[in-house]
Image: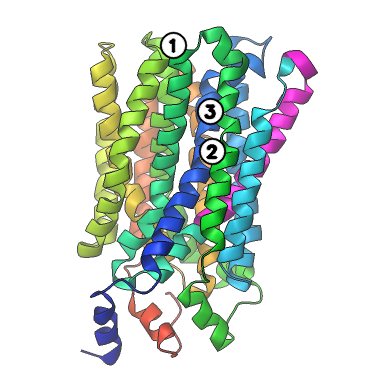
Amino acid sequence: MTSTNKAAKAVTRKPPPGALKAYVASLTGTSLEYYDFAIYSVASALVFPKIFFPGNDEFVALLLSFSAFAVGYLARPIGGVIFGRLGDKIGRKYVLVFTLVLIGVATVLIGALPDYSVIGVAAPTILVLLRLAQGIGVGGEWGGAVLLSSEFGDPNKRGFWSSAAQIGPPAGNLMANGVLAILAASLSDEAFLSWGWRVAFLASALLVVFGLVIRLKLEETPVFKAIQAKGDRPKAPIKEVFTTQPRALVAAALSRVCPDILYALFTVFVAVYATKQLGMTTGNVLSAILIGSAFQLFLIPLAGALTDRFNRRWVYGIAAAATAAYIPLFFLMIQGKSVAMLTVGTVIGLALHAFMYGPQAAFITEQFPARLRYAGSSLAYTLAGVIGGAIAPIIFTALYGAAGGGWYLIAVYILVAAVVTIVGMLLGRDPKPEEDVRLMQGTHAQPAA
């Protein structure tokens, strides 16, 4: 056994200094930011078509609302370029503080935005601009949050340590749907549409302050400090990623397509299908998503840890294949209009998502050398979001309409997404924790293949 491998194994015996604190900071920060993002996702399906896009055919209003929803995803590459570059040049910590503020301010302003009946066309216009700001912030947030926990943690257990940021979306979704479910249950439909939904958006101000307190107390990651000490920070990280890491970028981006589309199905479109096609209530749908998200809080770190013991790419690929097989079964399960079957089906669907999403952060970051990780990971994450989660609700709605309310075309769409992600697994590389160990020992880490 080489000295590098011995050092790598030694790291596994005890969490490195600051690892647990960084894990909590990554988890809480992304949870708060995805709370903001999640309340917009639910509102785009249930509220915004009625108050920001009135006067249109109901189907057209829904498409317009989902188009505004997509802007947040389309803006993510902008955030990935801006903050990915800064994250590899000036460090992870301060970039993460700025992204938290950006998303928080945008969300509070959405909660205070007058609707179409008050300021006319300015309302949906401003809504789109604020959604743009949300998307830019999230585009820069994810890569830094992942690196925060993984670069403090054990490189041999990157699947687990990186999963901190991955717990953020279901945790945020849990909080968002919980708040919206309570509001929907305690208020009349008129009161909820008038002002109730705004409470969830305005409440994020308190959550952002809490997140800032945690992040401002953190130090820079040991890996970035080592890069900084070696004078090896890239001058043009974005350019370097495109010119020296094309295969890594493609593999990492394709890995996100299926989990992104699957998540959009169960957290956004299912709300439309269940209420309009099956006649269920908004509360029924929100409760199902709430329970599914609660299971994900445990399944995501479990899945990440599992891929530290077994081949990461195989576990991820098997989950993608299982997803393609499951979607037709899910739609057959809920045709009886049973709330119980909707809940069970959603839990299973989000569990499959967890087994891709849990190890996703580790898979993406380990495709790139340490000096290009923030830029490479952010670009892969955000570019994939454009062809994945950004347009998924629109495509779901269009396919739903084309099939006359049927689900068959949606199942084919998921099948294609699963194949794309499996191709990403085949193109990617397996973990090489010795690269970080070598860097921390002061020797030059070899670049990713």
| Residue denoted by label 2 | 37
| Residue denoted by label 1 | 276
| Cα gap from disc 2 to disc 1, whole angstroms | 24 Å
Which dot, 2 or 1, sits closer to the camera?
2
Residue 299 in sight here: yes
| Cα gap from disc 1 to disc 3, whole angstroms | 16 Å
Region rendered in magenta: 117-143
Three-letter amino acid code of the residue under disc 2 = Phe
Q: Earlier in the sequence, mark 1 or mark 3?
A: 1
- SS class of the residue under badge 1? helix
Asked whether, in this view, residue 39 is left or right of residue 306, the answer is right
| Residue under the point 53% across and 45% down | 33
Asked whether, in this view, residue 293 is left or right of residue 373, the answer is left
| Cα gap from disc 3 to disc 2, whole angstroms | 17 Å
Three-letter amino acid code of the residue under disc 3 = Ile
| Residue under the point 38% across and 48% down | 167
State which quadrant residue 229 falls in.
bottom right
Q: Residue 47 or 104: which is nearer the viewer?
A: 104
Q: Are marks 3 and 2 in contact (CB under 8 Å)?
A: no
Question: Magenta stretch: dominant SS?
Answer: helix
| Residue denoted by label 3 | 394
Which dot, 3 or 2, sits closer to the camera?
2
Q: Give residue 437's position: percent from left, percent from top.
A: 36, 82
Asked whether, in this view, residue 402 is left or right of residue 97, the answer is left
Q: Earlier in the sequence, mark 2 or mark 1?
A: 2
| Residue under the point 63% across and 23% down | 64
Above-or-below relation of 34 to 27: above
Three-letter amino acid code of the residue under disc 1 = Lys
| Residue under the point 50% across and 38% down | 35
Q: Give residue 273's position: percent from left, percent from top.
A: 41, 18
Assess disc 3: are there few (<14), some (14-19) or many (≥20) residues with their C-alpha within 10 Å of its C-alpha.
Answer: many
